[in-house]
């Protein structure tokens, strides 16, 4: 058999150190993955203030990054299957140089979305024009280098999938580093420059891998034929897509769920994403620390536990401590990821089809993400995509998952719905020690037994569990519901017909009494005995400029405190909220008390920058996304902006009522830093008519102590607690962890 010149050269040079080859490839994959998952929260945080701090900014950005990841995998597949190895390296280095021309990433302050622009399209456009090309190039590193490694003489070259685990370790390091180290220590601009520097390092590593790969190849002998390409059935490809799509959909669903009531902050973004990537590390390892069969057996019990908790909370309106709820959602999400990604590993093809496999994996992930972030808001008026993804995970149980439903499955499902429909009708069910409650628990405990035998029946029972709260009797009936980029809004009427309620997400944002004699009396947090009602009366009675600015419209009830000679302006980011408040059949505060009051659309902080300095005597910051207050409205720079717009004796009022966060220490630090003085009022809820007057928590700030003293406020207003010495929140730094009430 003839020996080629290249073989003679390789033989003369001697074998390359196998550990050096592996170490270089692992280091390059690690660096590429670190860059990918560092830039995602970095760019999303840069964009967050432009869209009101909404959790949808991160959710929508994730869809873009999933699409860019797919583009990177397609690019890697094309050059690895269509070009010779030496040309692959040349083309890839040219692509890296092209990507470098877009760096460092900078989001210009003038790139604000117009009122008529779609937030999603605007966000996609900015991402594409800033980080799109570099992200595509870096994301191609994982499949391209694994393909190159499969052609080396390394002993594990025939099964390079274990390198995907090494790549995801880099991803996890990048995600953890951002909120824990990079965000507290570096400004966003400095991080962007540092990212560019490491991108240059990645380029050098990639070039070295390409050169080393060409020298380490065991060339094909003359006349030898390539092994036939393994054919993959369409059934198997559809399975790849399904097992990739469900965890991706749940990733965005659980992120949206936990950030809606806490805050849209990088730390809460990255927790689910870390678990998502950790599941890849575990299942793609040569020896997984959690066997795949364990994940499959645990998954049904995990899903029943979560579905039962969500249903119980919806039916009884009782809540668990935020720490327990957070851990439960993340634990179940991780179990689903382990089960589905483990099935992907079990069904992986030979190394020759590696890049094709990753394309399907990425495409499935993009489909799941796009379905949750883009399609669901268009077709659903509520957040149904999260429970639907959990139901889909039930149906994907690998054991005989196409087996049809049986009568026993339907009996189980009907029993679940029936018991919860009778929940409030039978007082016996309210007693935790009653045998009827035990029967419900036993019924739910039996549901997972269906999973292995009949996943379709198991999925039906989980669907019944999520459907039960919809059919069960409620304190209030939904009369209107819609959804926008910024969340789900519901209008409901109480069962006794006394109140109409406005909900955003899980939180009440306003109410109107339906009694004609009390129709225009503000309620809930804004009732006549509320701290904000007293403040408006006192400030407007003494302010030199009788002008009020309100960030956050809600049902519009505060406008009924306006006097004829006062100039009021609302700032509202969500046009859907304006439509609700302006529709008399829903709420009539705005039409009756402020038909001439302008509502300026856009992020309140950005919109205020266009107002005249010193215009307002009172600024009220009352912006919430469900239960979460957008972080960028509480930073040092934000408060400084507010005081630019206030008159010298003007007052800033911050509504910080929150189930899960303790925010007044954050305000105290900012006040100390800016030399401001303040008061805090915490009005507890009163028994009786719960919607007429609800508990609320307010902080007011002024430039001078005399300004507040002249107001002669009620005793409920206490001095703002002293600065606790913590770090001041800025646009470059915030720490949500320190504010969470973990056990309340």
Image (cartoon, rainbow, N blue to C red):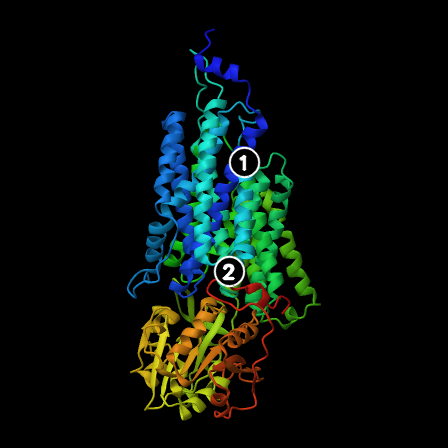
Up-down relation of residue 63 to residue 258 (above or below): above
Q: Is residue 328 left or right of residue 190?
A: right
Q: From where the camera sits, is residue 642 visible?
A: yes
Circle number at residue 560: none
SS at mark 1?
helix
- Foreground disc of the pair 1, 2: 1
Where does the image place residue 687, in percent across and percent down from the top left? 58, 84
Q: Closest to the observer: 623 or 299?
A: 623
Q: Closest to the observer: 287 or 700?
A: 700
Where does the image place residue 545, in percent across and percent down from the top left? 36, 88
Q: Quadrant of residue 321?
A: bottom right
Where does the image place residue 553, in percent across and percent down from the top left? 39, 76
Q: How far separated are the C-alphas under marks 1 and 2?
A: 35 Å
Q: Is residue 175 left or right of residue 576?
A: right
Extreme residue in the top direction: 1
Label 1 crowd bin: few (<14), some (14–19), many (20+), radius 10 Å: many
Residue at the spot 64% in from the left edge and 68% down from the top edge: 429
Q: From where the camera sits, is residue 457 visible?
A: no
From the image, tell me which residue sits under label 1.
26
Residue at the spot 44% in from the left edge and 18% down from the top edge: 226
From the image, tell me which residue sits under label 2.
257
Where does the image place residue 463, in percent across and percent down from the top left? 52, 55
Label 2 crowd bin: few (<14), some (14–19), many (20+), radius 10 Å: some
Q: Closest to the observer: 734 or 228?
A: 734
Up-down relation of residue 177 to residue 737 (above or below): above
Residue at the spot 47% in from the left edge and 33% down from the top edge: 145
Q: Closest to the observer: 680 or 209?
A: 209
Q: Which of marks 1 and 2 is nearer the N terminus?
A: 1
SS at mark 2?
helix
The image shows a total of numbered marks equal to 2
């Amino acid at each position: 058999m003839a020996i080629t010149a290249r073989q003679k050269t390789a033989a003369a040079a001697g074998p390359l150190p196998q550990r050096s080859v592996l170490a270089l490839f692992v280091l390059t994959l690690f660096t590429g993955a670190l860059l990918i998952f560092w830039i995602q929260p970095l760019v999303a945080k840069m964009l967050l203030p432009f869209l009101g701090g909404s959790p949808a900014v991160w959710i929508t950005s994730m869809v873009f990054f999933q699409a860019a990841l797919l583009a990177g995998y397609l690019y890697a597949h094309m050059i690895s299957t269509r070009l010779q190895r030496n040309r692959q390296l040349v083309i890839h280095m040219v692509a890296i140089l092209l990507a470098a021309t877009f760096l460092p990433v900078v989001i210009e302050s003038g790139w604000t979305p117009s009122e008529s622009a779609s937030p999603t399209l605007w966000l996609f456009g900015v991402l594409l024009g800033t980080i799109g090309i570099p992200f595509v190039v870096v994301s191609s590193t994982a499949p391209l280098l694994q393909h190159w490694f499969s052609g080396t003489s390394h002993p594990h070259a025939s099964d390079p999938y274990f390198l995907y685990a090494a790549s995801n370790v880099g991803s996890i390091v990048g995600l953890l580093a951002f909120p824990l180290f990079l965000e507290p220590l570096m400004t966003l601009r400095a991080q962007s420059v540092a990212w560019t520097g490491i991108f240059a390092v990645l380029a050098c590593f990639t070039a070295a891998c390409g050169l080393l790969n060409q020298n380490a190849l065991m060339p094909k002998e003359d006349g030898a034929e390539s092994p036939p390409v393994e054919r993959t059935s369409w059934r198997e490809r559809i399975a790849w897509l399904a097992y990739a799509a469900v965890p991706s959909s749940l990733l965005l669903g659980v992120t949206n769920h936990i950030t809606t009531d806490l805050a849209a902050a990088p730390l809460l973004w990255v927790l689910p994403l870390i678990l998502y990537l950790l599941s890849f590390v575990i299942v793609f390892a040569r020896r997984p620390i959690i066997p795949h069969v364990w994940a499959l057996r645990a998954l049904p019990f995990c899903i029943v536990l979560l579905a039962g908790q969500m249903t119980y909370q919806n039916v009884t309106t009782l809540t668990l401590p935020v720490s327990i709820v957070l851990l439960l959602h993340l634990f179940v999400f991780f179990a689903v990821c382990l089960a589905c990604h483990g099935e992907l590993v079990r069904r992986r093809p030979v190394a020759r089809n590696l890049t094709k496999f990753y394309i399907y994996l990425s495409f499935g992930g993009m489909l799941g993400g796009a379905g949750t972030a883009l399609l669901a808001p268009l077709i659903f008026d509520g957040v149904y995509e999260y429970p639907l993804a959990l139901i889909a995970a039930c149906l994907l149980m690998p054991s005989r998952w196409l087996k049809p439903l049986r009568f026993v499955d339907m009996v189980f499902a009907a029993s679940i719905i029936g018991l919860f429909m009778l929940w409030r009708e039978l007082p016996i069910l309210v007693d935790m020690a009653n045998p009827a409650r035990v029967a419900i628990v036993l019924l739910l405990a039996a549901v997972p037994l269906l999973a292995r035998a009949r996943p379709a029946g198991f999925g039906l029972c989980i669907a019944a569990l999520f459907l039960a709260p919809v059919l069960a009797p409620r304190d209030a009936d939904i009369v209107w519901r819609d959804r926008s980029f910024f969340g789900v809004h519901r209008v409901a009427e109480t069962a006794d017909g006394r109140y109409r309620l406005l909900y955003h997400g899980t939180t009440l944002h306003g109410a109107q009494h339906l009694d004609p004699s009390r129709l225009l009396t503000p309620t809930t947090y804004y009732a006549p005995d509320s701290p904000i009602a007293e403040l408006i009366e006192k400030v407007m009675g003494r302010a030199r400029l009788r002008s009020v600015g309100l960030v956050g419209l809600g049902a519009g009830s505060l406008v009924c405190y306006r006097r004829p000679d006062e100039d009021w302006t609302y700032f509202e980011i969500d046009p859907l909220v304006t439509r609700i408040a302006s529709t008399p059949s829903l709420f009539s505060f705005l039409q009756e008390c402020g038909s001439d009051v302008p509502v300026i659309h856009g992020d309140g902080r950005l919109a205020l920058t266009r107002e005249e300095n010193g215009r307002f005597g009172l600024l009220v910051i009352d912006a919430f996304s469900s239960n979460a207050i957008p972080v960028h409205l509480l930073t040092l720079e934000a408060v400084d902006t507010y005081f630019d717009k206030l008159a010298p004796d003007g007052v800033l009022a911050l509504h910080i009522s929150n189930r899960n966060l303790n925010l007044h220490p954050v305000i105290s630090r900012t006040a100390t830093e800016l030399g401001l003085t303040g008061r805090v009022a915490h009005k507890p809820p009163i028994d009786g008519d719960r919607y007429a007057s609800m508990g609320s928590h307010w902080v007011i700030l002024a430039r001078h102590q005399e300004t507040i003293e002249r107001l002669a406020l009620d005793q409920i207003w206490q001095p703002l607690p002293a600065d606790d010495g913590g770090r001041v929140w800025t646009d470059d730094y915030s720490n949500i962890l320190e504010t969470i009430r973990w056990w309340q």
